[in-house]
Amino acid sequence: MINQPVMKLYIAFSFLSIVILISCTSPRKQDNTEDWIRLFNKKDLTGWDIKIAKHDLNDNFNHTFYVKDSILEVDYSRYGKFNGEFGHLYYKEPFSYYKVRVEYRFAGQQLTGGPSYAHLNSGVMLHAQSAASNGKDQSFPVSLEMQLLARDSNETRPTGNLCTPGTQVSMNGKLVESHCINSSSKSYPGSEWVTVEAIVMGDSIIRHIVDGDTVLTYEHPQIGGGFVNTNLTWTSGGFGADSLLWMQKQGKALKEGYIALQAESHPVEFRKVELLNLEGCMDKSALNYKSYFIKANNSKCVYK
């Protein structure tokens, strides 16, 4: 006969065992809150590299890029005349599968000497080469440019277009020869804040979104083709010693790269640059599993 104290201990142990068993076998409640990364911290240019054509890496020539009142400014007030100093601001980390969101508007007048096509024109470079790999005189990085445009009194044009410096894409299963492809977005005045997004899935599908509407879809980006400017080639675009290397890479799939903001002679402002990484832990038993991940990288999984 089991005495009462032993019986109570036995019951307590049995109950604890059941609780542990249930907790181990029940599915863990997942937190699927989207973890957006604020690439632009609204304070300074921490985390970004500067590359302006004709100047060394991180030489912020004429203070072209700076932050004021929580706005990232591309400013030409210290220039006398534009002389081919195309600039790009690169985030420090490359990505492959991601969603990037930017809010922009144009400010002021285009700098004297800027090319006519750069009027009310900027861009977000996707899958770009790194800032450090640019040649000193290189005008544009090899990348996919999500073009940011605005209208004026003389011209109405969409935004969220695609331009392809040193790259090519396919649409509907066919390689596109055009260097710039217009989106289906409406036209916006330069002074209006516009939200643009890109959903980038490695070297498969990429979508441009303007104010919540998908305005352009393309797939299979690769190195190759020509440039936005017809007078630029692998040997005349400032690539220097890397010209032959890039030519040998033509046809290679563009699977990942850096995000860069463009400066090409018209002042522009950015008040938001943020990213949602779509690559991560896809093990549902992990603490950091997210249902919105598209590409698995289980080396990042975190367990209790």
Image (cartoon, rainbow, N blue to C red):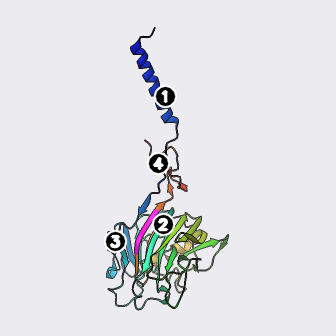
- Give how far apart the Cα atoms at labels 1 and 4 are: 28 Å
Which residue has dot 4 on it?
301
- The span from disc 3 to disc 1 (Cα, nearest Å) is 54 Å
- Please tell me the numbered disc located at residue 100: 2
Q: Which residue is mark 3?
A: 70
Residue 303 lies, in percent from the top left, at 45, 43
Q: Position of residue 195 (x, y in %)?
A: 48, 72
Q: Are marks 2 and 3 in contact (CB under 8 Å)?
A: no
Q: Nearer the viewer, residue 187 or 88?
A: 187
Q: Which mark is residue 18?
A: 1
Residue 134 visible, this angle: no
Question: Considering the numbered disc 3 on the image, is that residue within a helix, a strand or a loop?
Answer: loop
* In contact (CB < 8 Å): disc 3 and disc 1: no
Q: Earlier in the sequence, mark 2 or mark 4?
A: 2
N-terminal of the pair, mark 3 or mark 1, is 1
Q: Which residues are magenta?
A: 270-275
The label nearer to you, 1 versus 4, is: 1
Q: Image quadrant for the C terminus? A: top left
